[in-house]
Image: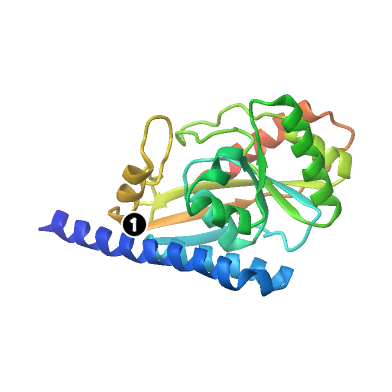
Amino acid sequence: MHALIRSLVGLWRLARMGLHIVLGVTKIWLTFGRLGHEERNRAVERWAGQLLKMSGIELRVLGAVPQQGPLLLVANHLSWLDIPAIHAAKHCRFVSKSDVKAWPIIGSLASAAGTLFIERHSRRDAMRTVSRMEEALRKGDIVAVFPEGTTGDGQQLLPFHANLLQSAIAADAAVQPLGLCFYDKQTGRMSSAPSYVGDESLIGSMWRTVTAPPLVAQLNYGEPQTHAGRNRRDWSADLQAAVDALRQVQR
């Protein structure tokens, strides 16, 4: 009986999420172009926060959420829910693989949120992306990257790629480490329900999430850092250590 109730709740949540996503894309097509820059950012934050609630996830924010740029956020990467969780706390411009732009619906949502797309296997495009990131930072944007380059299993961080840090060095912008995790609200233990790694399917991850016990998405913002003469590799190693400490559950 308990499993049946969880399945019914999961179906209800998925239905609401699906409608929310469709309404979000419709708003982009019909009204987004008429909104000012800050209005669009606030709309993204509201939409992302509502999606989390519909997924059955409570947002918990620790540390100082950045209010303005120029700033580069670096975070660990666990799930398809990472981006909505971070957007719900504060809109930022993510750097994402170019494939996402072509995805039905998701591509429209990502583009409307100001995503910067990168061809990961192209050195020339990586340099172009660093240049676009530098430009966005100089304009005062908050830009966010997942330096692992892919989702991890939550047990340990994958090595950070340092290349995109060059944008912060060139723009003389601060970098703020951000650790995120999902945990069971009752037990306080990390949850792998929202994980989306390796051969896991998106549908499977979504189903585990919406049928799981109440979950908390924890965002733990660390202290912003300047490069202080460090090269990007040394700075990347220091930021990885900071993110590793911040991604632990704080009760």
Viewed as shown, does residue 210 lie left or right of 160? left
The answer, for residue 56, to whether it is visible in the render is: no
In-image side of 235 versus 5 (left or right): right
> Does residue 66 appear in this view?
yes
Determine which residue is flagged by label 1: 186
Q: Mark 1 is on which residue type? A: Gln
Above or below, 150 relative to 218? above
Image side of residue 228 versus residue 91, left or right: right
- Residue 91's quadrant in the figure? bottom right
As drawn, 19 above or below 236: below
Q: Residue at x 44, y 64 (%)?
A: 22
Which type of secondary structure does the marked residue at label 1 adopt? loop
x and y percentages locating residue 145 in the rendered image: 66, 42
Residue 130, horizontal then vertical, whole percent? 78, 37
What residue appears at the point 38 percent right and 66 percent down from the top-left corner?
A: 19
User: Where, by quadrant of the figure, is residue 111 drawn?
Assistant: bottom right
Residue 149: x %, y % from top left: 59, 33
Instruction: Tell which of 42 and 90 is nearer to you.
Output: 42
Q: Percent x, y for residue 67?
A: 73, 63
Image quadrant in which the N terminus is located = bottom left
Front residue of 72 and 98 = 98
Residue displayed at 44% across by 49% down = 182
Quadrant for residue 31, please give it: bottom right
